[in-house]
Amino acid sequence: MSKKIKVGLVGFFGWGNFGDELFIKVFEQWLGDKFDIRVMNDLTYKPYFSRPIEEVVAEVDAIVIGGGDLIIPWTMSDLYWRDEYLAKPVFVVGVGVPTWGQAKPHIVEKYKKFITHDSIKFFNVRDKESAEWVKRNISSEVAVNHSADIVFSLNMPLKVDSEEKYFGIVTRDRKGTPDDLTQVKRLAEKAKSQGFKIKHIILGTGDVGKRDVERADDLDIEGKELVFSESLDELCQEISSCKMLASMKFHGTVVALDYGIPSIVLSATDKNRNLMRMIERRELLSSLNDETLPDRVHPFVPVIPWTSIRMLRQRAEITMKNLGIEISKLNKGLSGGLGL
């Protein structure tokens, strides 16, 4: 009987950022039964590995990089994109390309060298805009496919049907700098006037969660309910209890949409714009300083249609199924080289 293929996971794992920790749950759900999966980095600070990276790479048979905004055209992480990984088959899944910064040609060239390497066996990005960037800037011949954020493939905890009419608000700490939440406070007051009760959800665990909760008092709303938990399932269920959400965090919006809950985007980044384009709900795009933000709350905000949710889920599920299939191929004809 062959041993399980050992798969190393590379991403922003261990810091407690909500979306990235959900990625681990996605990998556990879709890959955990078939393969021996483990997070590669054991440190949350440079150099990220307590042992020589060559030793860490030698202990796995394949490496999965993703998801999140990992292809940043003006900088290249020395955690996500290490030449040492290319000693093993590499599978890239669910990544995105932010474009708000100025691309640096020498950085793009480094990505090109990595992404076009023969060791890349699977290359999936989160949206068509990221795929188009890759085709334009890396190579038109790169076999890149696009789907939807892979968290949409996650089996969510059961939805909580609350007797309260909750309006959820997700804030975050951004490197210790206080944000001007004046318009968010106006949004909350408008929601209260519409009969909502405000639920301030801290979508972070570990170190990220501690920093986020330290900024919670910046949103001074009388009578708000503050939610902070180390359980990802509990945080998802807190979102599910809301009738509407306003979120500074992308995966707050992703989870809300997965439950069919409309989510006002408080940070109109590329990934948020692209997601709202997918579901044709651009009216939910806003920003912290948008003076019309309170106008987004009214009694008849349409829920997210089941057809849109199903489309996102199916795209993400197909991606994860295909990822598993491609990794499984390593067992065929390569068992000797993999030590299986």
Image: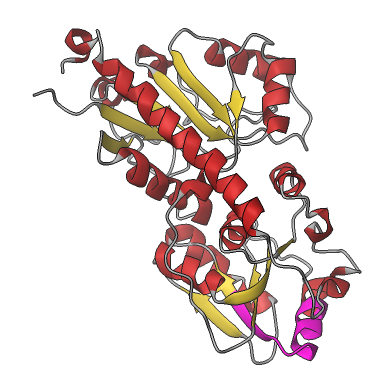
The front one of 209 and 178 is 209
The front one of 48 and 114 is 114
The image shows residue 133, relative to residue 184, as above or below, that is above
Q: Going 67% across and 26% down the picture, which residue do you hit? A: 131
The image shows residue 172, relative to residue 326, as above or below, that is below
Quarter of the picture holding the C terminus? top left
The front one of 104 and 203 is 203
Q: Is residue 215 visible?
A: yes
Quarter of the picture holding the N terminus? top left
Is the image coloured rainbow, by chain, by secondary structure, or in one colour?
secondary structure
Check the image and name the residue furthest to the front: 307
Q: Quadrant of residue 3?
A: top left
Q: Is residue 189 magenta?
A: yes
The image shows residue 330, relative to residue 183, as above or below, that is above
Q: Is residue 47 visible?
A: no
Q: Going 53% across and 23% down the picture, which residue do you hit? A: 123
Q: Quadrant of residue 232?
A: bottom left
Check the image and name the residue furthest to the left: 1
Residue 262: percent from the left, percent from the top?
Answer: 69, 65
Q: Going 50% across and 62% down the picture, which residue do you hit? A: 204
The front one of 110 and 318 is 318
Q: Quadrant of residue 33?
A: top left
In the image: residue 45, left or right of residue 280: left
In the image: residue 141, left or right of residue 264: left
Q: Is residue 249 magenta?
A: no
Residue 231: percent from the left, percent from the top?
Answer: 39, 66
Q: Going 51% across and 80% down the picture, which residue do you hit? A: 161
Residue 255: percent from the left, percent from the top?
Answer: 56, 59
Q: Which residues are magenta?
A: 186-200
